[in-house]
Structures are given as structure tokens and as C-alpha cells.
Amino acid sequence: MHYGLGLGPVSFEDSISPELFERERAAVFKQVWPLDPSQIWPNFVILIWLRGGYLTYHYWPTSHNRQLFEGNPYLGPAKTARERVAHQVAGVSFKHFSWQDPNTMEAAHSMLGSRAAEWVDDYQKELEKQEEWEGIRV
Amino acid sequence: MADTLLPAQFADLEPFAQKWCLATESERFAQRLASSIAEMQAFYDAVVPRAEEAISYCDQFPLQELPPDALNLLHLLYSMVLISFPVEAWGQPRIPDTGAAYLDLIIEPVP
């Protein structure tokens, strides 16, 4: 239930437990691991996604509604043409999906900038009513 | 300047060489945006069945010492990679759902 997060202390046992560390290490290095993102405040992301490589994102705000997005795929140097073509597939895939990702923010800011968002207030009122009904809001 | 850009055994791909043997990703991406899906489909249909042989041909040489015709062939493979997404998935040169966002490639490995 997403309402249950609260404001109390949060356990970070899963970040310091040796047992969980070993389980994650095995998952990353011994099994196929689809994606492991680390969000580092305030604007840096490390994505372990590529086999034998990783990606980084930087978000650089340039105004209240614009930003520069910088993405870097890091791969070991290709030793053969075959490896280089494989890297090209990885790089092009990265460019294609990361071009779509910033557009979610572009679209959100375009919508907010249009000032056609009175529904936010309506939604907020509906949410408050729902929370009162569920006994979450008093 | 040589009459042909590709090694002799890839003469069947020569009709696509002038357009798609491009050294940089920005040139290849601009070519993709300037091409129709029908043009890219014709290139795709010609190059994909030859891709494995083309990679093996390039693999005969050290990556940093490719002869000019093999380097052109490698660039043609890069173009194949780039146009495979619109041909296989989108049916349009542009990436869907990108709106007004713009992303450019600044640094890339050579070759």
C-alpha cells in the first residue's frame, strides 16, 4: 500500500547486510542481471545494464523548465570488427531509448507550461476525499 | 578516387555504398531522417543476409588497420544497425515518443 510509507525512520538493513550484499553480488556477476540503476543525488545515475559495460546519466537543469541531458555508455575497447559492431548495436540502442526518456519530462513541462492543468486541483480534491474515506486523512 | 567503395565480393551492396558508407553517426542519422522507409527496407533486405560474411571479412584485419574498402564495409554495417530499428519496429525514420526532445552524439569511437 503506497500510503503506508509514513515519515518514520526507514530501515537501511538491506544496504548494509553482508548476506544481502553477497546475494546481490552473485546476481550481478554470476547470473544474467537485466538492470541495476543507482541514483546518486542530485543529478547522477549509474546504470549497470550492458554486459561488460555500464551507462551514466547526468541531468543539468538550465532553467525552471529546461535541462540538458547527458548520457554516456562505457564499454571496453573493441578488439575486433565483430566486437565493434556489437558495441554499435549497444550504442544505438542506448541513444534510441534515452532519447525517449527525457521526452517524458519534456512532455510534462509542456503540459504544465500550457496552463491547461486545472485538473490538478480537481485531482487533489478527489484524492483528499478518497483518503478521508479510507481513514488515512483526518 | 576508386570506382567502387566496397571489396569486390560485396559488389551486390555497391548500389547502397555511396549513400550509406558514412564515417560518423551524425551523418548516418541525418541520412536516415532523409530516407523513406521503402529506401531503408531495400537497403535492409540487401545487407542483412550479407552481414555475417561482411563482419567476418572485416575481422581478417586488425581493427585499427582496416583497408579503405573494408572500413567502408564496416561503416555500411553501422548504417545497417542504425536503420534496423525503424525498419523492424517503427515504420518511420524518427524515434517515436520523443516529442520536442533532442539528443545528439558528441563523441564516438573510431573506427
Image: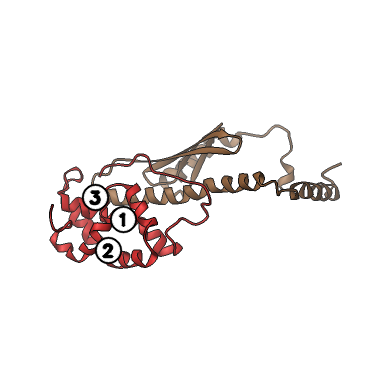
User: Which numbered disc, 3 or 1, marks the residue closer to the eye?
Assistant: 1
Chain with colour red in the figure: B
Chain under label 1?
Answer: B
What residue is shown with label 3?
Answer: A81
Circle 1 packing at 10 Å, graded few (<14), some (14-19), many (20+), is many
Marks 1 and 2 sit apart, C-alpha to C-alpha, by 10 Å
The residue identified by callout 2 is B47
Q: Are marks 3 and 1 on the same chain?
A: no
Q: Residue at x 16, y 53 (%)?
A: B69
| Label 2: which secondary element | helix
Q: Position of residue B7 (x, y in %)?
A: 15, 58
Mark nearer the N terminus (1 vs 2): 2
**Quadrant of residue A20 in the image?**
top right
What amino acid is found at the position of numbered circle 1 in the picture? Ser
Q: Position of residue B84 (x, y in %)?
A: 37, 60
The amino acid at mark 3 is Ala
Q: Amino acid at mark 2?
A: Val
Q: Answer whether labels 1 and 2 touch (C-beta < 8 Å).
A: yes
How many residues crowd mark 3 within 10 Å: few (<14), some (14–19), many (20+)?
many
Q: Of circles 2 and 3, which is in front?
A: 2
Residue hosting label 1: B79
Q: Helix, strand, or loop for circle 3?
A: helix
